[in-house]
Amino acid sequence: MKAFDKNYKLLDEMYRDEYFPDFLVDKVKGELQKVIDLLETGETNTEVIQEKLDEMVYAINDLQEEFDENGSEIETVARDCIGENIGYVLKWFGISIDVEEAIRERDW
């Protein structure tokens, strides 16, 4: 079992941008952490991993209204940041799922 890169700052770009409230970025990070937790168990079945990725994306989709209520939205910067982070996580663990496929259920 491999631990995630302790030096990688998840969603760093979103945290550095005041447009995104930190408490909401924390929620997105929490969903991403669930995927990392699964991968740290040594899971390599891409169907199982994709299911967890879909769950993560559905949860992030559900945060859109809360972002809006706080004067923000999951837009280009956030979309790119989340995608890049997913790509890094998948590469770190050697999982061959394309980023676009990984976040296929997004509506942001």
Image (tube, grey):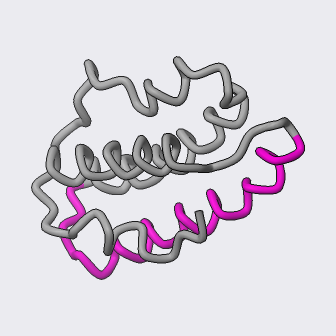
Image location (x, y in percent) of residue 31: 55, 50
User: Which residue of the protein is positioned furthest toward the right in this rendering?
Assistant: 69
Hey, which quadrant is residue 60 in on the image? bottom right
Side (left or right) of 100 relative to 70:
left
Q: Nearer the viewer, residue 91 or 72?
A: 72
Q: Is residue 104 above or below residue 89?
A: below
Residue 62 painted magenta = yes
Q: Is residue 101 above or below residue 75?
A: below
Hey, which quadrant is residue 55 in on the image? bottom right
Which residue: 48% across, 72% down? 54
Q: Nearer the viewer, residue 16 or 52?
A: 16
Hey, which quadrant is residue 99 in on the image? bottom left
User: Which residue of the protein is positioned furthest toward the bottom in this rendering?
Assistant: 47
Q: Is residue 20 above or below residue 88?
A: above
Image location (x, y in percent) of residue 61: 65, 63
Side (left or right) of 49 relative to 72:
left
Image location (x, y in percent) of residue 40: 28, 47
Q: Is residue 39 above or below residue 107?
A: above
Image location (x, y in percent) of residue 70: 85, 36
Residue span colored magenta: 42-69
